[in-house]
Amino acid sequence: MSTENTARPSSSIHGIWTKRWTFILAASGSAIGLGNIWKFPYITGENGGSAFVLIYLACIFAIGIPIMIAETMLGRRGRKSPIETMRDMIAASNASGFWLIIGLMGTLAGILILSYYSVIAGWALGYIPKLASGEFAGVTGASANAIFSGEQGFLSDYKTLIFWHSVFTIVTVYIVGKGIKTGLERAVRFLMPALVLLLLILLVYSAIEGDFAKGAQFLFAFDASKLNWNSALVALGHAFFTLSLGMGSIMAYGAYMPQQDSIAKTITLVAVLDTAIALIAGLVIFPLVFAHGIEPGAGPGLMFISLPLAFGNISGGAIFGTLFFILVSMAAWTSAIALLEPAVCWLIERFKMGRQKAALLLGGIAWVLGLGSVFSFNIWQEYKLMDTFTVFDGLDFLTSNIMLPLGGLFIALFVGWVMKPEVVDAEIDMQNSSLRTAWWFVLRYIAPAAVALVFVLGVYNKFAS
Ligand code: PFF
C-alpha cells in the first residue's frame, strides 16, 4: 500500500483529465493500427475463427493488460528510453544485467516490425488513389481479388509498392524527427473518432449487404475443432502486437505519463478500446467475405479485397472508401511513430545524437529491411526459409510470435519477482486492494506460466508439423 498517495498534491479535475487524455490518446494511437483492421481479421480467418478469437480475448485480458500495466509502470518509473530505463531499474534492484534484454530486444523488435509495417501501410496509401479514381465501382469478389493479387495486380508491381513504402517511411521519420509530442495529440484526437465512425458506417453496410449471421457466427460461436498450439501462439503474439506490448513502446510512452494518473485504469481503457476496434473490424469484414465467396483464410490481402468490394458497391463508396484508407494510413502512422520512438530516444540519450538524425538513420535501416517484405509478395515469393517463411512471414513470426511474447514474459518476471514490491506498488498505486492482490498474482504466476506454455508448445507445433 502506498503511503505516498495521500501525500500527493491533487491537481484540478480539469488538469487531471486533460493530461490523462493525452496519454490515453497517444497509447491508443500506438495500439490501434494495422493490427486491428488489417491483421486481426486475416489471422482470425487463417486460424479458423471463433476459437481463435476466444483465446485472443483471454490473452488480452488475462495476460496482456496485467503485463501492460507492468510495462507502463517501468516507463513512468524510469522516465527514459526503454534501454536506459531498464539499466536504471536493474541498478535500483541490484539485479543481473540479463534483464537489459527487455530494453534491447524490444528496441530491436520495433525496427524489425517497422520494416514490414510500413510496407503494409504503403498498401493502404496506394489504395487511396485507387478508391478515389472509382476503379472499384461495381466490382465483384473475383475482380477485387484480381486488382489486388492478380498477375498484373497491385502486389505484382514492386516499384509501386516501394514508392508507397518510401512515402510512409519518410513521413514517419519526419514526425518522429520533429518530436512525437507535437501534433500527435491533435492528430489522434480527430483520428480515433473519425475511424470509429467510419467503421460503424461500414458495420451497418455489412449488416445489410453481407451475410452478417455467418460472419458473427464465424467470430463468436466457439468451435474448438480448429485449434492447435500454433494458433494459440498466434493469438498470444497478436495480443502483444495489437497492444504494442512487450517491446518498450508503451514503456516509452509511460515515461511521459503524469505522476497522478492511474496506470491500471488508463491501460485497461486503452486495451478495451483497442479490442473493440478489432472486433468491429472483424464484424465488418467477415459478413462481406461470406456473402461474396471470398476465402476467409485469404491471408494478408483480406482487407484489401473485401473492403474495396463493399465500397465499390455502395453509393458514395468512392468517397467513403478513400476516406477509410486515409484513416487507416493515419492510424498506421500513429503506430509507426511508437515503433520508432524507443530506438530514437535511446540514440539521443546514449550518443547525444540529434533527434532528426537518429530518426533518419533508423528509418533508413527499416526502409532497407522493408524491401525484403516488398519482394515477398512478388519477385521473391517463391523463396521460403525452411519451406515456410517468406521474408515478410519470417519477420512477422519472429517479432510477433517470438520477440514480443518473450519480452512480455521477461517484463512479468522482472516486475513480479526482481523489483522491490514496495517500489512497484508505490508507482502503480492501485487503490482497490483486491484488484492489487489479483494483479500481483496474475503477474507473478499466471502470466509467466501461460506465456511460457503457449510459447513452447506453439513454437514446437509450428516446426514439428
Ligand atoms: N499496435 C499496433 C497495431 O496494432 O497496429 C502495432 C504496434 C505498434 C506494435 C507499436 C508494437 C508497437 F510498439
Image (cartoon, rainbow, N blue to C red):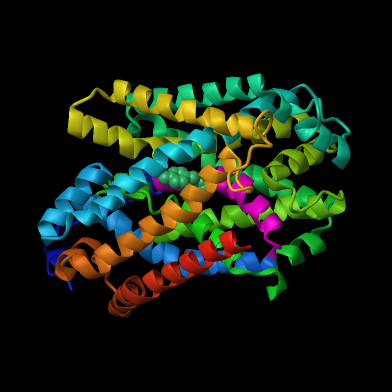
The answer to whether 205 appears left or right of 179 in the picture is: right
Instruction: Kindly tell me whether residue 73 is visible in this rendering.
Output: yes
**Residue placed at 66% from the left, 26% from the top?**
126
Front-most of 166 and 264?
166
Front-most of 132 and 337?
337
Q: Position of residue 365 (x, y in %)?
A: 41, 27
- The image quadrant that residue 215 belongs to is bottom right
Magenta span contains residue 43: yes
- The image quadrant that residue 224 belongs to is bottom right
Front-most of 277 and 349?
349
Of helix, strand and loop, which mostly describes the magenta segment? helix
The answer to whether 306 appears left or right of 350 in the picture is: right
- State whether residue 362 is above or below residue 185: above
The answer to whether 458 appears left or right of 62 in the picture is: right
Q: Position of residue 263 (x, y in %)?
A: 31, 59
Q: Position of residue 146 (x, y in %)?
A: 83, 33
Instruction: Kindly tell me whether residue 273 is visible in this rendering.
Output: no
Front-most of 369 and 318?
369
In the image, which residues are magenta? 26-49
Quadrant the N terminus occupies: bottom left
Q: Position of residue 245 (x, y in %)?
A: 41, 53
The answer to whether 200 appears left or right of 185 in the picture is: right
**Residue placed at 32% from the left, 65% from the top?**
412
- State whether residue 31 is above or below residue 135: below
Quadrant the C terminus occupies: bottom right
Magenta span contains residue 369: no
**Residue placed at 32% from the left, 60% from the top?**
410
